[in-house]
Amino acid sequence: MSQLMPEPLATWTWRLERVRNGRTVLTRAQAATARTDLVNDRAAHPTEYAGYDEEYAIALDELDVLSRQANRHDDLLSVMAADRRRAEREATDGGSPLPGGAARGRVSLASEHDRVPKGLPEPLDQWVHRLIRYRAGVKIIAPLEASQAEIRLRNEADLQPAVYRTGFAAAYYNRVIRELGEIATAERPGRRDASRARGLGELLV
């Protein structure tokens, strides 16, 4: 074609392909918002969509279907939140004393959690805390889970750029996306070599 596909249409065409392949998920709210954004973008820039009528129609149809489907991942965030609370209770538990090194590790982990600022978007906040435990070796994140989380966070950031890409949240978002990307391309789940670990720790000093 003589011109590139408009960026919003290209972005959602790519994401919908990942949805079809099972590599990411969209909530009803995300799909509905994306459909509205595409309609508005085409109305504002009709010449940019010339020659892409078929792609545009397919994207609208698929987003419409997704916007009317029952969410199958509604409990995901609550499960993640419960997991974080359980780990934090374990990290700050005043029960039987641990050997010196392990005790210091728990204290250090709890202090890292405490240094995460309040006010981050909830999905981002949850992954900040999960990555703290991952780097400490007390949490395993599989590459597929990291890949799915990265896409979900990117989707959220695209839908709410003022929340994710401004202020202190932007720094945490960029680090989380980078670390999730590194985990997603790892050969196996588990903790990375300490000499290669970097990212969120730089923000938590």
Image: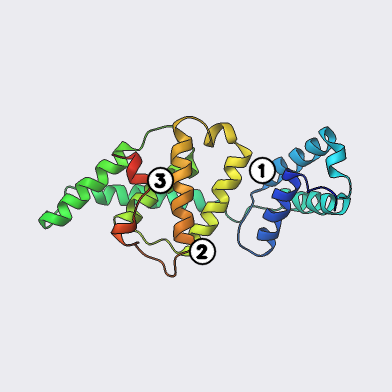
Q: SS class of the residue under badge 3?
A: helix
Above or below: residue 63 compared with residue 168: below
Residue projecting furthest to the bottom = 187
Above or below: residue 183 compared with residue 166: below
Tag of residue 29: 1
Tag of residue 128: 3
Q: SS class of the residue under badge 1?
A: helix
How many residues crowd mark 2 within 10 Å: few (<14), some (14–19), many (20+)?
some
Amino acid type, residue under disc 2 in the picture: Leu
Position of residue 181 measured from the top left corner of the image (x, y, whole percent): 49, 56
Q: SS class of the residue under badge 2?
A: helix
Residue 47 sits in quarter: top right
Position of residue 14 measured from the top left corner of the image (x, y, whole percent): 69, 55
Amino acid type, residue under disc 1 in the picture: Ala
Which sits in the foreground, 4 or 113? 4
Q: Earlier in the sequence, mark 3 or mark 1?
A: 1
- Is mark 2 in CB contact (under 8 Å) with mark 3? no
Marks 2 and 3 sit apart, C-alpha to C-alpha, by 18 Å
Drawn side of residue 177 relative to residue 13, left or right: left
Position of residue 17 measured from the top left corner of the image (x, y, whole percent): 70, 59
Drawn side of residue 204 relative to residue 187, left or right: left
Q: Earlier in the sequence, mark 2 or mark 1?
A: 1
Residue annotated with mark 2: 144
